[in-house]
Image: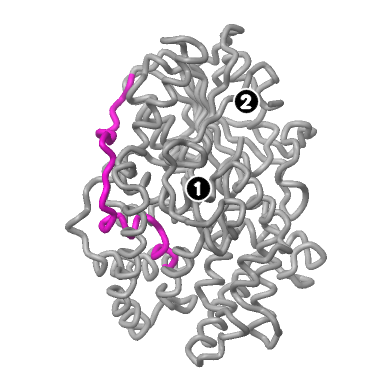
């Protein structure tokens, strides 16, 4: 509320198929109040059990052969999940597409503010896709729009899903290195994987060594401790989560230290104790919130129904094609998130039986009555900075400036995950006063490994380290924006926000809330 100046009522809704929407897309037969995180991620974990096993330097040919040989078993398992989803939800799977959710947003705006009024909207992650579709489908309704963490609408709607999976990996190494650098700077009293004298580079070597230790344990069949396996996949999952979630870096460092201890003779350590333990209070609070809002009950079926339902037909793709692409990504793009693709919806859309009854065409260049604000972290693996540049350039390519880009100079998924008084001030002035800035690079207040991730994000003093500078365009040249406008409108009283669709961090499920 403070970021928007306290002038707006904030209204959110469950996208179709999610949470308490009706009919919600269900998978579990368990009472939502009794759902445990192990129930929620069971499908992911079953798929990950057959993930490509690889050292930090990449897979051997024997690793690849074993992985490809598992394609049939993995497909059989996924088909059983699909059949249960179809039996439980029937034709409803066709009616939860993102275009329908955009139409719901417009209907909601009409009901509250009246037909035809400009829509004020703040979308995060998947919510930026809803925002992008709104620009294309209802350009005349665009009021003040902020999109944070851009999901590329063109790639999402027009490319075969499994071939687009690695598009965000360009930001992965930078985001992971930010975690390791912050750990080294914080020291062992705060970050458990640090030692006196650690550097970001030495911790990267440590992380690679942990992958290799787990790999050797699997190869010699000594990774079993109690009821779980401390595998390279488990290590990669934690590192991938670190690249996305800086607000939980201390928890992730604890998990990595625990894995290290288990691989070096510690007792009572297993994958389940790390992934599902209630000792991680903040992860537990996320689960509690998710259950309260009815969101975990719809995962994972709604996740596949929406993302695969929105995608183009890929029925000519085989599971072996997908597995070969996972091998290529692991060898040529990034060997940490690469093997985890096996648990991504993009790897299985070729077997998903339903497509949305209305899907978005190729995005065009809409003519907007108001300029929008695009926000992105410098390193954001799921929704990379390049996607923000692409959307800005598309909207501005028609001869007029329709979008400004704020680059939040931090790492992690969404600018909201790393404090920046500079970014918050720009967003506040945009919503309250209508001020559209030049493209700007903002520094952050975020230091990592400290603080409450759900605390007040606005009552922070502006640090002298805050940067406010012209932002280079995607070619590296400084690109000046149009003169900022200062338009006041006190008639609009509702700020619209899309709640982001569930995404799996492989070891837990995290939601983004406004």
Where is residue 303? Give x, y as percent.
42, 49
Quadrant that contains the N terminus = top right
Between 51 and 195, the residue placed more toward the observer is 51
Q: Is residue 356 magenta?
A: yes
Q: Mark 2 or 1, which is nearer the eye?
A: 1
Q: Is residue 429 magenta?
A: no
The residue at the far left in this view is 316
Between 84 and 194, the residue placed more toward the observer is 84
Where is residue 169? Give x, y as percent.
44, 56
Between 279 and 136, the residue placed more toward the observer is 279
Q: CA distance from mark 2 to mark 1?
A: 28 Å
Does residue 220 appear to the left or right of 419 in the view shown? left
Between 370 and 14, the residue placed more toward the observer is 14
Highlighted range, magenta: 339-366
Callout 2: 10 Å neighbours few (<14), some, many (20+)?
Answer: many
Where is residue 91? Give x, y as percent.
29, 43
Up/down of 451 relative to 347, above or below: above
Question: Which residue bears the numbered disc 2?
Answer: 426
Which of the 4 image quarters holds residue 78? bottom left
Question: Which residue bears the numbered disc 1?
Answer: 502
Up/down of 348 relative to 356, above or below: below
Does residue 154 appear to the left or right of 116 in the view shown? left
Could one spot residue 207 in this view of the protein? yes
Secondary structure at badge 1 equals: loop
In the picture, the disc for residue 184 is: none
Callout 1: 10 Å neighbours few (<14), some, many (20+)?
Answer: many
Which of the 4 image quarters holds residue 81? bottom left
* Residue under the image location 70 percent in, 62 percent down: 278
Where is residue 206? Give x, y as percent.
63, 75
Could one spot residue 176 in this view of the protein? no
Numbered marks: total:
2
């Amino acid at each position: 509320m403070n970021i928007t100046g306290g002038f707006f009522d904030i209204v959110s809704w469950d996208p179709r198929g999610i949470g308490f929407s009706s009919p919600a897309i269900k998978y579990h037969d368990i009472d939502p109040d009794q759902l445990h995180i192990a129930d929620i991620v069971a499908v992911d974990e079953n798929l990950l059990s057959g993930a490509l096993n690889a050292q930090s330097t990449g897979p051997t040919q024997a690793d690849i052969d074993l992985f490809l040989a598992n394609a049939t078993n993995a497909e059989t398992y996924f088909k059983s999940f699909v059949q249960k989803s179809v039996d439980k939800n029937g034709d409803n799977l066709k009616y939860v597409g993102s275009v329908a959710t955009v139409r719901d947003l417009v209907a909601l705006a009409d009901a509250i503010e009246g037909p035809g009024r400009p829509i004020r909207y703040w979308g995060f992650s998947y919510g930026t896709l809803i925002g992008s579709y709104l620009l294309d489908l209802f350009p005349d309704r665009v009021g003040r729009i902020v999109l944070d963490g851009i999901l590329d609408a063109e790639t999402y709607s027009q490319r075969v899903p499994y071939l687009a999976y690695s598009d965000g990996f360009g930001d992965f190494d930078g985001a992971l290195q930010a975690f390791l650098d912050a750990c080294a700077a914080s020291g062992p009293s705060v970050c458990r994987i640090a030692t006196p004298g650690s550097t970001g580079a030495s911790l990267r070597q440590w992380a690679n060594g942990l992958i290799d230790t787990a790999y050797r344990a699997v190869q010699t069949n000594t990774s079993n401790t109690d009821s779980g396996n401390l595998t390279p996949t488990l290590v990669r999952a934690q590192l991938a989560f670190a690249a996305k979630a800086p607000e939980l870096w201390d928890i992730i460092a604890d998990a990595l230290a625990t894995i290290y201890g288990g691989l070096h003779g510690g007792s009572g350590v297993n994958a389940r104790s790390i992934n599902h333990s209630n000792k991680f209070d903040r992860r537990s609070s996320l689960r509690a919130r998710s259950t309260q809002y009815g969101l975990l009950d719809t995962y994972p079926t709604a996740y596949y129904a929406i993302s695969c339902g929105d995608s183009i037909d890929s029925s000519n793709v085989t599971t072996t094609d997908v597995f070969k692409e996972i091998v290529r990504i692991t060898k040529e793009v990034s060997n940490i998130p690469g093997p985890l693709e096996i648990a991504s919806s993009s790897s299985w859309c070729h077997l998903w039986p339903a497509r949305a009854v209305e899907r978005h065409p190729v995005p065009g260049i809409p003519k907007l009555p108001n300029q929008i604000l695009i926000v992105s972290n410098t390193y954001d693996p799921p929704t990379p900075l390049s996607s923000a540049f692409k959307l800005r350039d598309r909207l501005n390519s028609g001869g007029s400036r329709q979008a400004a880009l704020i680059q939040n100079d931090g790492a992690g998924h969404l600018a909201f995950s790393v404090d920046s008084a500079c970014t918050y001030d720009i967003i506040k002035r945009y919503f309250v006063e209508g001020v559209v800035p030049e493209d700007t690079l903002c520094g952050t207040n975020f230091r990592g490994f400290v603080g409450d991730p759900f605390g007040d994000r606005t009552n922070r003093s502006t640090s002298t380290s805050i940067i406010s500078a012209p932002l280079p365009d995607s070619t590296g040249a400084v690109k000046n924006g149009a003169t900022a406008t200062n338009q006041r409108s006190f008639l609009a009283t509702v700020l619209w926000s899309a709640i982001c669709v569930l995404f799996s961090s492989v070891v837990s499920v995290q939601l983004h809330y406004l």
